[in-house]
Image (tube, helix red, strand yellow):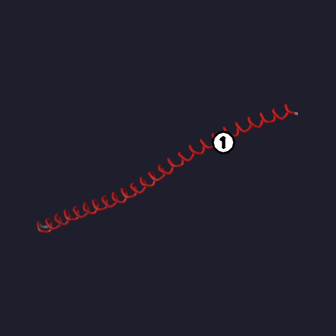
Amino acid sequence: MNDKEKDIIERDDERLKILVNDLFDKLKESLLTACTKQIEILEARLFEKEIENDTLKKDIKNLKSQVNLQSEENAKLKTELANQEKKEKIRK
């Protein structure tokens, strides 16, 4: 092989290396962009779920409060009913 052929092969080899490196860089960038986009989507979904969970926690707290109030009212009514029944027995 003469010097001219070696020079051409070496230049082509260097160009090929540059081309492969550029290709890998573009591929890495594309993959990174896709992963970043997917992460952002997942983070948004997670945020929405956290908001939904907070809302449900508030609803549960309110419902527990309502149940407690209703239980207290029921207890008062039972006491009143028992007192009225005692009064009626005494009258008779």
Asked if 21 appears above or below 5 in the picture, the reply is above
Answer few, some or many: residues within 10 Å of disc 1's Cα (few below 14, many 20 plus, some between 14 and 19): few
At x 45% / y 51%, what residue is drawn? 46
Along the line of sight, which residue is nearer the eye, 3 or 41? 41
Q: Quadrant of residue 42?
A: bottom left
- Residue with the most extreme front position: 91
Horizontal and vertical percent position of residue 7: 13, 65
Please name whichever residue, 72 or 7, is drawn nearer the observer in this view of the structure.
72
Q: In which quarter of the image is the C terminus?
A: top right
Residue farthest top in this picture:
90
> Quadrant of the rendered structure where residue 74 is?
top right
**Residue 84, placed above or below residue 41:** above
The quarter of the rendered structure image containing the N terminus is bottom left
Label 1 SS: helix
Q: Position of residue 85 (x, y in %)?
A: 81, 35
Residue that label 1 marks:
70
Instruction: Residue at 85%, 31% (x, y): give it.
Output: 90
Left or right relative to 63: residue 54:
left
Q: Position of residue 33 (x, y in %)?
A: 33, 59
Residue 43 shown left or right of residue 61 in the figure: left
In the image, 88 versus 72, the foreground residue is 88
Which residue is located at x 11 percent, y 68 percent? 4
Position of residue 67 relative to residue 4, above or below, is above
x and y, in percent, of residue 27 in the image: 31, 61
Callout 1 amino acid? Gln
